[in-house]
Amino acid sequence: MIDDWDLAATNLNRIRGHRYEVAVLPTAAVEAHNLHLPEGQDFRHATWVARTCCAAAWERCRSVICLPGIPYGVDCNMLAFPLTVHVSQAALDAMVRDVILSMRRHGIRKFVILNGHGGNDFRPLVRQVQCDTDVHVFLCNWWTVGTDRYAEIFERADDHAGEMETSVALALYPELVEMASADPARTPSFRFEALERGWVQTSRDFAKLNAVAANSDPTAATADKGRRYLELVCGRITDFLVELAESPIDAAFPHRSP
């Protein structure tokens, strides 16, 4: 069966007879995630979420296309760990902008960046593209979609390679998770209260945190928690894609008409 929502699987004969409203691009990174998770963690889960949501949305609106993802991301603060792949935000922005403009050439004016890596910051790009073109770009950091219900599922806060990320990995690709190697990932606090409270921010050099490239404890992770969170997140993203596809671009879009 050919999936017409998957650009890498469908073909010219099917594409040229179809009208697509929304393009979805997964973005990610390749980097260390503690000692127990695969280096491709971000790429794997971002791609899975994008494909799952596009497939579900297709059944309801048949006008969403999932693009092949970009695996590499901004990882300069992880280069102390072997085989980390880093691309600059400028290079990443240039690639994403060209993809957006390619889709515009084919009549698609609604574009969703489904991001799977916290180091990628596309907000300035989204602002600039929408200033320069008539394309509406939407940014979704997928792991934050269920933040309001996070505490119902997980015991501990997760920032990188902790309970949530490990639970998602156990749900999606347990054969790649080596829980026996998982480190509790204890990290030092900041010496400045402003940084601890979060009203001043800085970039973190992960090599200064610990030797495992993580800052969250994964030991309470389970596959069931991962499945519950993925179901919540994918349901919400799917609903958004359908609503986006079915909403006409008028003078007020994406706001409600006065």
Image (tube, helix red, strand yellow):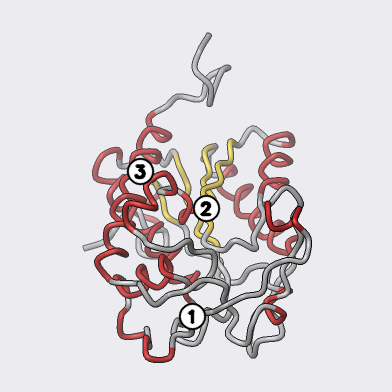
Q: CA distance from mark 2 to mark 1?
A: 25 Å
Circle 3 residues within 10 Å: few <14, some 14–19, many ≥20: some
Q: Are marks 2 and 3 in contact (CB under 8 Å)?
A: no
> Given the current orientation, which residue lies at the most extreme left position?
1
At mark 3, the secondary structure is helix
Q: Are marks 2 and 1 in contact (CB under 8 Å)?
A: no
Residue at 71% x, 71% y is: 87
Residue at 53% x, 57% y is: 115
Under mark 3, the amino acid is Arg
Q: Is residue 14 visible?
A: no
Q: Is residue 26 above or below residue 218?
A: above
Task: Describe residue 130's horizontal placement relative to residue 29 as left or right.
Answer: right
Q: Is residue 132 above or below residue 179?
A: above
Closer to viewer: mark 1 or mark 3: 1
Residue named by callout 3 = 236
Whole-percent x, y for residue 67 in the image: 47, 58
Residue named by callout 2 = 141
Residue named by callout 1 = 184
Task: Please name whichever residue, 87 or 142, is drawn nearer the observer in this view of the structure.
Answer: 142
Residue 70 quadrant: bottom right
Residue at 54% x, 51% y is: 113
Whole-percent x, y for residue 61 in the image: 30, 38
Circle 1 residues within 10 Å: few <14, some 14–19, many ≥20: some
Please give the count of numbered marks on the rendered protein: 3
At mark 1, the secondary structure is loop
Whole-percent x, y for residue 257 in the image: 50, 13
Closer to viewer: mark 2 or mark 1: 1
Whole-percent x, y for residue 96 in the image: 64, 56
At mark 2, the secondary structure is strand
Task: Please name whichever residue, 101 or 111, is drawn nearer the observer in this view of the structure.
Answer: 111
Q: Is residue 215 visible?
A: yes
Quadrant (top left, top right, bottom left, bottom right) of the N terminus: bottom left
